[in-house]
Amino acid sequence: MSEALKARIRQPRFEDAYQEATLDLLAAANSIRDRMERTVAAFGITAPQYNVLRILRGAHPAGHPRGEIADRMLDRAPDVTRIIDRLEDKGLVARERTSSDRRHSITRITDAGLALLKDMEPALRESLDAMRRALPDADCAALSRICGNLLEALDS
């Protein structure tokens, strides 16, 4: 059992190794999420907005329809349209209607959105430096493999 988890939840034992591993994984993920949320908030956006910007940077310059953005999000946010609305209000994305139906549009990241992501990179890198120091590359590869196995098993 990890000492960090023991100290955090003050529980001396678990039902089995799977329960312990699950709680360790959830606690670590929450710590990473908290760091990310604090970091992106300093730039005036939320973690879901950051996620959308990263998705659109990967599709630049073509962009994506709303449904494709929703499918690619790490956290399945039910309010993708509102997230995009807020990013559009900030000038970080632009929508182009493909028909008279508002639901059919392509969202693209703007130059301002690309610049914001570039400005955020050093702060995000610094925010996760503790993780880099704690996990050598081989451990990161193993963790990625393990998480991939979990995602495949749980999402099927």
Image: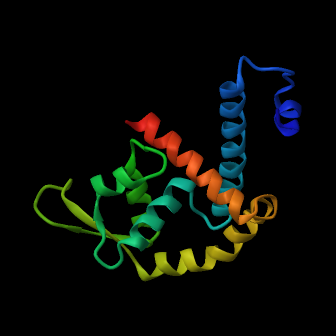
The x, y position of residue 49, in whole percent, is 49, 59
Work out whether residue 59 can be spotted: yes
Residue 95 occupies quadrant: bottom left
Query: Residue pushed farthest top?
Result: 15
Work out whether residue 81 can be spotted: no
Left or right: residue 51 versus residue 14 is left
Q: How many badges with numbers are in the image?
A: 0
> Colour mode?
rainbow
The x, y position of residue 92, in whole percent, is 44, 72
Q: Observer-nearest residue: 44 or 106?
A: 106
The x, y position of residue 144, in whole percent, is 59, 54
- In the rendered view, tell whether residue 42 sits above or below residue 115: above
What residue is drawn where x is 63% and y is 73%?
A: 120
Left or right: residue 150 versus residue 28 is left
> Which image quadrant: the C terminus?
top left
Residue 89 occupies quadrant: bottom left
What residue is drawn where x is 85% and y is 39%?
A: 4
Residue 126 occupies quadrant: bottom right
What residue is drawn where x is 86% and y is 30%?
A: 6
Left or right: residue 4 versus residue 43 is right
- In the rendered view, tell whether residue 23 sits above or below residue 135: above
What residue is drawn where x is 68% and y is 25%?
A: 19
The x, y position of residue 71, in whole percent, is 35, 50
> Which image quadrant: the N terminus?
top right
Q: Observer-nearest residue: 24 or 145?
A: 145
